[in-house]
Structure formats: structure tokens, C-alpha cells
Image: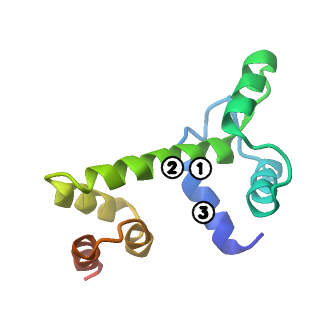
Amino acid sequence: MNKSYRNRAELYKRFVNPKSESFDFSEESLKELFDYESRGVGNCDVYDRYTEFLLTGKKQNGYAIGKRFLDITISMWKEDANEVGWGNLLESLAEEFDIDWLKSIFKYEHHQKFLEEFRK
């Protein structure tokens, strides 16, 4: 597991409450998600794991939940970026997130140029 993946995992934490008693952010959970994403080994399916949590109380993989919430959030951002007022959205995101990361999400030229203005 490289540094880039660990940095991404820290981003996943931002989309859930890392202090919640329901989520496991151990090194083992990080490795479990990495193995699932990189080699298809194990089960990090959010819905399967949630059912397990309801039945047994076992903590859920916080990284897997955070990744799912991040994916949903990015989908909403992309949808909102096509509406009137998209500049306000990108401006607020540029204050909180890395510009290169945002540019990897928002591919339209006008979004790219707008985000580049925040690098200066």
C-alpha cells in the first residue's frame, strides 16, 4: 500500500465521523479496503456490512463507508456544477480541497479554468 492510497484513505475519513463508535479506522480496516479495491479480496460491500452491524453490533469499516459517502458526494457535486451558481460551489470546494484533486473531478474546460484561478 503506497502513500498515495493512505492519503486518499485520510480523505475518506472526512466524509464520516471518525469519532463514531460505529466505525473502525484501524490499520486492519485500511488493509481490508485496500485488498478489496486492488485485488477483489474480501468483502467491503457497505450494504452487507451494515446488515452485519445491525445483527451483531460489529463496527463497520470506516474507510469503506467514507469512500461510499465520498463517491455519493462527488456525484452530487458534478450534478450541481452543471447548474446556475456552479462558481459558488467550486469556490467553496477550492477553499477546502486540493485544486489538482478537484480538477480531476471537474473535467469541463470552464470548470478547469475557474479552479486554476484559485491556485494563484
State the residue at coordinates (40%, 63%): 97
Nearer the camera: disc 1 or disc 3: 1
User: Mark 3 belongs to which amino acid?
Assistant: Arg
Q: Which residue is mark 2?
A: 70
- Give coordinates of residue 99: x percent, y percent: 37, 72
State the residue at coordinates (62%, 41%): 65
Measure the alpha-carbon separation of dots 1 and 3.
9 Å
Q: Which residue is mark 3?
A: 8
Pointer 1 with pointer 3, Cβ within 8 A: no
Residue placed most toward the observer, 78 or 62 = 78
Q: Secondary structure at mark 3?
A: helix
Name the quadrant containing residue 104: bottom left
- Give coordinates of residue 25: x percent, y percent: 71, 45
The answer to which of marks 1 and 3 sits earlier in the sequence is 3
Name the quadrant containing residue 36: bottom right
The quadrant the N terminus occupies is: bottom right
Q: Secondary structure at mark 1?
A: helix
Pointer 2 with pointer 1, Cβ within 8 A: yes
- Give coordinates of residue 46: x percent, y percent: 67, 37
The quadrant the C terminus occupies is: bottom left
User: Mark 2 belongs to which amino acid?
Assistant: Leu
User: Mark 1 belongs to which amino acid?
Assistant: Lys
The answer to which of marks 2 and 3 sits earlier in the sequence is 3
- Give coordinates of residue 3: x percent, y percent: 69, 73
Label number found at residue 67:
1
Question: Quick one: label 1, few (<14), some, or many (20+) residues within 10 Å?
Answer: many
Q: Secondary structure at mark 2?
A: helix
Question: Quick one: label 2, few (<14), some, or many (20+) residues within 10 Å?
Answer: some
